[in-house]
Amino acid sequence: MWCWFFLPAMQTRSIRFYPGSFPLLQQKGGGMLESDLKRLREKFGNRLQENVRMKNYTTIQTGGFADALLIAQDAQELEKFTNQVWELGLPLLVLGSGSNILVSDEGIRGVVIINHAHNISIYARQDAIQVIAESGALMAKVAKQAINRMLAGLEWATTLPGTVGGAVYGNAGCFGRETADNFIQAEILHRKQEKVIYGKEDMAFEYRSSILKRNLQECVVLSASFLAQPGEYDQMMQKIESYKERRQKNQPSGPSMGSIFRNPQDDTAGRLIEAAGLKGKKIGGAEISDQHANFIINASGGNAHDVWELIQTIETAVHQKFGFFLHPEIQLIGDWDRKILQEFEEYQTTQENA
């Protein structure tokens, strides 16, 4: 979801919205003004952290420093902090588990909210059983809590990395299933419309995409509900063990962002990358996994630039061999060079098999 807009207090800074409903600042050079930091200190007191290393908040363990950071412990705090930063007119990024993103080595200008809103509840209604989770809850924990209550339907998500917010935003999935299969509705905070309920039709889910990802919106996912039904515990555990074995067999361990590219129609990105001869290729401390070529591993203290160079290498090699670019599933976050951003957008807008 790409949204460019300008805030009155920062007319020279351009901002983009990113997964699960979090906007991201893309600006080259400079840090937050001292006057802005002073306003944040006055507003948030000791809840505010400054100059925070983002590698500690991303699954691939790369990234420079964020100017300012807050941690929201529940949906109420997430809503409150988001509105307060919006009122100050400052750039804002809301981040969940930190998967599927590559934060620049130059860091992030503006405010980052780490979403730890993780409460989960289950409601039985006449027509359905709903599992309701705050957007910072890990999808795997949501699924496991449902299973512990003898509820089936979410077994596929027990090995899914990432949070509810990111899953809803990107229609995350695995093993032939996706978030849309169980989705009922989400509560979404809009900057201008306040809180709105989005049903399944409103979300307009597509493969690894939703209306939030495709459209230009200032919003934050607060919570979502998912459909479940009574199930047999032994049968559910058999499915979970099968999914776990498949993931351990086919997907590498170690720090990564998850899958780098979307699968083209009737093919897989991993097969194409392997066919281009890139399995195991290394740049700096980053490495294309020799277990699954659609994963880049931070094997030995690699940085974001190492990872980006591997992504470029993959795009070039696949294009030369097959005549098209792969569509990135990950997003670039933070203070990237404009040329890199332009190249990344080209990869995102180029049609596979064109």
Image (spheres, grey):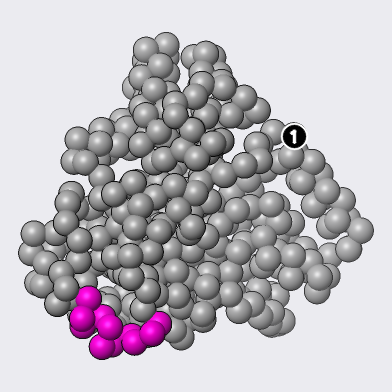
Q: Is the residue 264 above or below the residue 18 in the image?
A: above
The residue where tag 1 is placed is: 249
Q: Main secondary structure of the magenta part?
A: helix
Task: Find numbered disc 1 in the image and state the secondary structure of the residue it sits on.
Answer: helix
Nearest to the observer: residue 308 or residue 272: 308
Q: Amino acid at mark 1?
A: Lys
Q: Is the residue 125 above or below the residue 26 in the image?
A: below
Q: Image quadrant of residue 142?
A: bottom right
Residue located farthest toward the right when viewing the structure as drawn? 234
Nearest to the observer: residue 147 or residue 286: 286
Magenta span: 37-47
Q: Residue at x 39, y 22 (%)?
A: 313
Q: Residue at x 84, y 65 (%)?
A: 231
Q: Is residue 143 left or right of residue 83?
A: right
Nearest to the observer: residue 33 or residue 17: 33
In the rendered image, residue 10, in percent from the top left (x then y), is placed at 11, 67
Q: Residue at x 56, y 35 (%)?
A: 299
Q: Image quadrant of residue 322?
A: top left
